[in-house]
Image (cartoon, grey):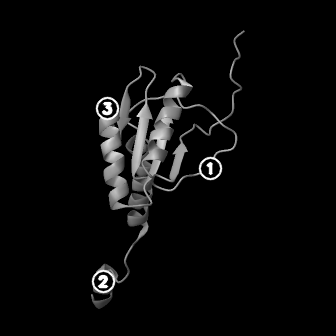
């Protein structure tokens, strides 16, 4: 009877079910991470072969193909953009800006945003691209 009691006692912790649960959770997080990190505003970014990663930014300016402008995901006018950049530079002199312009946006519009950003004291800015591959633009004659 004493040996029957010893068999009934669990002296080790079985970690196999814990590992199974953790692997399932890891797979779920890996599959849904791109949905969480995806931008809310859909733009078609131009492609480039030489892409570099950019450190996290303070301000994100998005230009859509309809001509609308967004600052950190919210609609913004040029005055709102100017005020936000000035306020951000006043708080942090190392403010960074990323400009994401749809590939159908006028080149002049993107240059205007870059010029505004630079004139307000931002020294670190970049144009966001889609690094998945380079497709040569079609030249119309």
At label 2, counting other C-alpha atoms closer than 10 Å, the crowd grade (few under 14, some 14-19, many 20 or more) is: few
In the image, 51: left or right of 92? Answer: right
State the SS at label 2.
helix
Whichever of labels 1 and 3 marks the residue nearer the N terminus, that label is 1
- Considering depth in this image, is 80 or 24 the residue closer to the camera? 80
Residue denoted by label 1 = 52
Whether the residues at callouts 2 and 1 have beta carbons within 8 Å, the answer is no
Query: Taking 126 as reference, is 18 above or below it?
Result: below
- Considering depth in this image, is 127 or 116 the residue closer to the camera? 116
CA separation, marks 1 and 3? 29 Å
State the SS at label 3.
loop
CA separation, marks 2 and 3? 79 Å
Residue 86 location, x and y as percent? 34, 50
Q: In the current view of this chain or complex, which residue is farthest to the bottom?
A: 2
Quadrant for the N terminus, please. bottom left
Residue visible at 32% across and 80% down?
10
Whichever of labels 2 and 1 marks the residue nearer the N terminus, that label is 2
State the SS at label 1.
loop
Residue 19 disc label: none
- Considering depth in this image, is 79 or 107 the residue closer to the camera? 79
Residue 77 disc label: 3
At label 1, counting other C-alpha atoms closer than 10 Å, the crowd grade (few under 14, some 14-19, many 20 or more) is: few
Residue 4 disc label: 2
Image-quadrant location for residue 140:
top right
Residue 107 location, x and y as percent? 56, 27
């Amino acid at each position: 009877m004493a040996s029957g009691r010893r068999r009934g006692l669990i002296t080790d912790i079985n970690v196999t079910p814990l590992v199974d649960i953790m692997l399932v959770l890891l797979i779920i997080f890996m599959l849904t991470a791109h949905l969480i990190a995806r931008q809310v505003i859909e733009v078609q970014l131009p492609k480039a072969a030489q892409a570099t990663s950019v450190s996290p930014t303070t301000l994100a300016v998005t230009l859509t193909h309809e001509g609308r402008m967004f600052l950190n995901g919210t609609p913004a006018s040029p005055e709102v953009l100017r005020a936000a950049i000035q306020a951000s530079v006043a708080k942090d002199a190392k403010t960074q800006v990323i400009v994401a312009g749809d590939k159908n946006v006028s080149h002049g519009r993107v240059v205007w945003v870059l010029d505004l950003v630079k004139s307000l004291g931002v020294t670190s800015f970049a144009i966001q691209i889609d690094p998945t591959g380079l497709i040569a633009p079609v030249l119309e004659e």
